Amino acid sequence: MSGPRRMGIKLPESESERDAVDAVYGCLTTGSEEVGRGFTESDDDWSPMWLVATAAGQGTIITPVEMLDQADKIAITEYVARFARKVGAVAVGHLNSSWLVATEDVGEARMKEIDAQMKAQYGSTEGIPERREILMLIIYTATSWRQYHASIERHDGPPTLAPWVLMGSSDKSWNLTGTMSDPIRESLRRMG
């Protein structure tokens, strides 16, 4: 992985984690919609990015130069975690396009079949006709997380986004854990 790019931005100051979550959500959802308005081709896509936010309103957008494989994903995630710890972040948002198969779309019986297929494919949804493309946003703080998504709608022209939907959160759902979330959450817990 080549070194990541960083760009500083100004965010509202945060008096609470909730303020920081709201600032990150507003910046990344509005920004992704603006990026989408600039698309010209049907296969244009959103680049992965992270937004590291401090209570003082310092925001840093971090983008990888390239993410070709799992090692690149781990390296950029560890970089973001170290950076968040260094600047005393109160929230980190991660935005990326992905694929989703939701139980409410396919029913529980079909979802069991899909789960087995995905396990056999090491988590990939490739070849699953019910999958849908989404832009996913996860926002982490020292004590919580929230996950949103907007469906990516492909047309003859440039893609567009459906409205953002809350998909899960630490106060309503399962525990979020994984290669990309654990280092970020640990860096924020050390700060919190």
Image (spheres, rainbow, N blue to C red):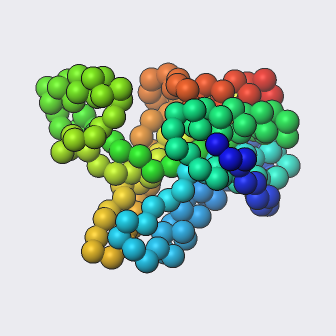
State which quadrant residue 9 falls in: bottom right
Of 35 and 172, the residue lying toward us: 35
Q: Is residue 192 visible?
A: no
Of 157 and 110, the residue lying toward us: 157
State the residue at coordinates (40%, 63%). Answer: 161
Residue 39 percent coordinates (x, y): 46, 73
Residue 95 percent coordinates (x, y): 55, 49
Q: Is residue 110 visible?
A: yes
Quadrant location of the C terminus?
top right
State the residue at coordinates (42%, 40%). Answer: 167
Residue 4 percent coordinates (x, y): 71, 49
Position of 8 relative to 178 (above/below)? below
Say how many tags the image has.
0
Residue 181 percent coordinates (x, y): 58, 30
Residue occupying the far left of the picture? 109
Quadrant location of the N terminus?
top right
State the residue at coordinates (81%, 45%). Answer: 55
State the residue at coordinates (54%, 56%). Answer: 47
Q: Classify residue 128 as left or right of residue 152.
A: left
State which quadrant residue 108 falls in: top left
Q: Classify residue 76 as left or right of residue 70.
A: right
Of 97 and 15, the residue lying toward us: 97
Q: Classify residue 116 as left or right of residue 35.
A: left
Q: Classify residue 142 as left or right of residue 139.
A: right
